[in-house]
Image (tube, coloured by chain):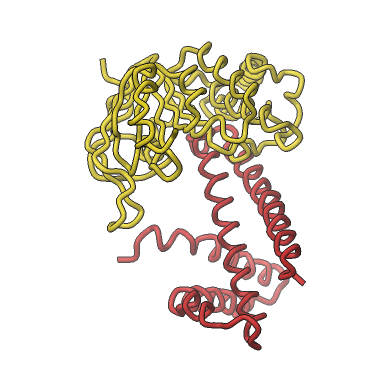
Chain colours: A red, B yellow
Amino acid sequence: MISRRILAPAVPLLAFALSLLALEAWSGRPDWGLPLRTLAAAASLVLAARLVPWTALLRRVRPGSRLFPAALYLWMLRHFTRILLQESRRVLLARRFAAPRTLRAGCFRSLACAVSAIVIRVLLRAERFYAAQMLREIGR
Amino acid sequence: MNPLVEVSGLAYGYRREQPVLRDVSLRLEAGERLGIAGGNGAGKTTLLWCVLGLHRGRGSVRLFGEPATRKSWRRIGVVFQNPEDQLFMPSILDDAALPLLNRGVSPDEARARARRALHAMGLEHVAGRPAHELSLGQRKRAALAAALAPSPELLVLDEPTAELDRPSARRLADLLRGIGTACLIASHDLDFLERVVHRLALLADGRILACGPVGEMLAERELLARAGIV
């Protein structure tokens, strides 16, 4: 049986795909193609991220080789994803402690504020990371 | 009467082959302030997370006489190492009022109590400002005010003096001594712990080396060295 933990991350994606479908229907030409392609792209990206040993592959690329800029780009992408995950976990955890009762006063407003705080904090950390790479002459 | 926190035989690891906590046992009674001291990587934060029920390890962790659940968080105030983690509302007044609103307190009453909590921390004059406009010391105090506003029975603090200068750390210590709420504090700042806690547990390599009155523990130089904090 597929666990709730695996299914939970798919909920926002399904909601996004359904919103796309609803918008298509609203415009008078319901088309299943776009939401289905969205789901297929997300599923293939998740599978690629899970199945391909990216870290081992990237470590094999030698500095100065032709593949190095692409490897560096993927390495940084991985780092940014980690930053996003860390910041999201920390802020959303703090919100759960501040507002432990779901569907009570302040619940949705605090969620909206927490999500916007995550965006700002990720941007700030990304800026610091970029500045550090620039100083090391990597970010050019 | 049940202790507020009762941990017995707790073992936890992020990976099975690398345990972070091994056979940890401790108790915290009502009104008591217990410090957990240890060097970097000793397992202090992991222990706090296990106590809060965020990590489930082997052994037993009981909060207020029951297994730790989300329901028990309503009786706890938490101050994270980085105060920005918990100050995400448009103003620190909103941050302090949020837990009260969420517990069903009316908006007017929530704002009044939040103002009182900020006043107690000397922050009333900046109550309408967002956290990122405040100094680090002010943010720490704002996080503490937000945690204290709903009058929790237990306050959990993770490295409360990290990145604070000495005067700010002393002020924070005085504030904590003045509130009378039971505290569980993880820190490697021995000066701060000496000022605040009644008992101190020394943690090294995921084990409690010793636990006792703070004065006695701080006199044990060899144990402190083994815990990696002197």
Picture residue at 67% right of the left edge, 33% below the top: B136
Q: Could you tell me which quadrant the C terminus of chain B lies in?
A: top left
Q: Is residue A12 above or below residue B137?
A: below
Q: Position of residue B143 (x, y in %)?
A: 60, 29
Q: Is residue B196 above or below residue A72?
A: above
Picture residue at 49% right of the left edge, 17% below the top: B195
Between residues B214 and B26, which one lies in front from this camera angle?
B214
Describe residue B210's horizontal placement relative to residue A66 as left or right: left
**Residue B105 occupies quadrant:** top right
Between residues B79 and B99, which one lies in front from this camera angle?
B79
Between residues B5 and B19, which one lies in front from this camera angle?
B19
Q: Position of residue B127 (x, y in %)?
A: 73, 24
Q: Position of residue A24 (x, y in %)?
A: 68, 72
Picture residue at 47% right of the left edge, 12% below the top: B180
**Residue A63 occupies quadrant:** bottom right
Q: Is residue B40 above or below residue B168?
A: below
**Residue B118 occupies quadrant:** top right
Q: Position of residue B197 (x, y in %)?
A: 43, 19
Q: Is residue A49 above or below residue B73?
A: below
Picture residue at 47% right of the left edge, 77% below the top: A56
